[in-house]
Amino acid sequence: MNSDHLGTAGAPDAEALSDAMRTAATGVQAPAGLVQGGLARGRRMRAVRRMQIVGASLAVVVAAAGGTLALTAADGGSGPAATVGRQPTVTVASPTAPVPNVPRLSAQQVWEALKPLLPPGSITNVQLHEPVWDDNPHKMQSAAGVSFVFDPDGKGAGEVSFSIKPTSDLAAYECPDYTGTVATCSRADLAGGLLIELRKDREYPVSATTDDGKAGSEGRGAWTHAANLRLANGFGVTMYSTSTPTDKSGTTGRPAAVLTLEQQQAITSAPVWQSLAVPGSLPTRQATPAQGAGNGAVPENVGAPTATTAPSGTGWGSGTGTGKG
């Protein structure tokens, strides 16, 4: 090193050393990449510095319970704190599926299924009884049924009614005590989980006494046959026949109801009622009165029955029994 660049006691002079370094660097060309990298690094450092300055003016308090950030002025100002909450959860409800057009049992369907099961005879005055449904398409509030006047042999007509609906009243299938009367009742469990009750009685039912106008042990009015059958799925079928074509006619009419108890058991236990009683098993159909629906239509001859053992439902009134419901 040149002695001109030495300070007191031979120590390098700072200014002289700086001049010497600049002189040595004169003409040296720095690599282009190094220059650009240095410029970029400088810009980043300035940006970081600005963020540090802004951040230094705020105190960040984390509310652990609610996950809320309260940003408060660092100088302890009395202004309200800015609260940043979590983004609310947005629940998007799935579109409600349309209620399917669930098929419903109609009186017309019951009538169409019943006709092939009847013995030969003439049919007049057919009336359909449509069921009442609640908001649940699978639930019937009253039965689907049909009533008509039937003459099996030309010796006198009687009234017949048939109905099907859900039932839960097992007590309705218990036989009364008919001891000492002209009435009879039998109850039996059939194959396939069926429960049947068969009754022979009078239009004014038999009773132990004649007090309060009761009919007594002989009963009064037309003879009646009733078949009440309950399916394993909770539906019930009721079939009722009499010995006169009208209610409370004051006469007995024929010596017995127009259908025997055996015929009514075969009809009510036919397999068709099992399929009709299953909700959704049939297409929806608008019922239209068959045979003129109670207007004295022309008699219809019905072929021989094809009934076999199977399931069923209950009357369109309050349930099973010796009447039409």
Image (cartoon, rainbow, N blue to C red):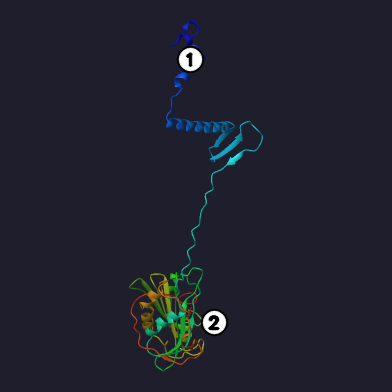
Q: Position of residue 242 (x, y in %)?
A: 45, 86
Q: Which residue is mark 1?
A: 17
What residue is drawn where x is 50% and y is 6%?
Answer: 8
Callout 2 crowding tier (Cα within 10 Å): few <14, some 14–19, many ≥20: few
79 relative to 292 in the view: left or right: right
The residue at the point 58 percent across, 38 percent down is 70
Depth check, mark 2 against mark 1: the one in front is 1
Name the residue nearer the viewer: 126 or 52: 52
Residue 53 seen in render: yes
Numbered circle sitting on residue 213: 2
Farthest-out residue, bottom: 154
Tell me which corner region of the image, top left, top right, bottom left or bottom right, holds residue 199.
Answer: bottom left
The extreme top residue here reads 9
Residue 176, quarter of picture: bottom left
Percent from the top left, x then y, of residue 112? Answer: 41, 82
Q: Residue furthest front?
A: 27
**Residue 80 figure quarter:** top right
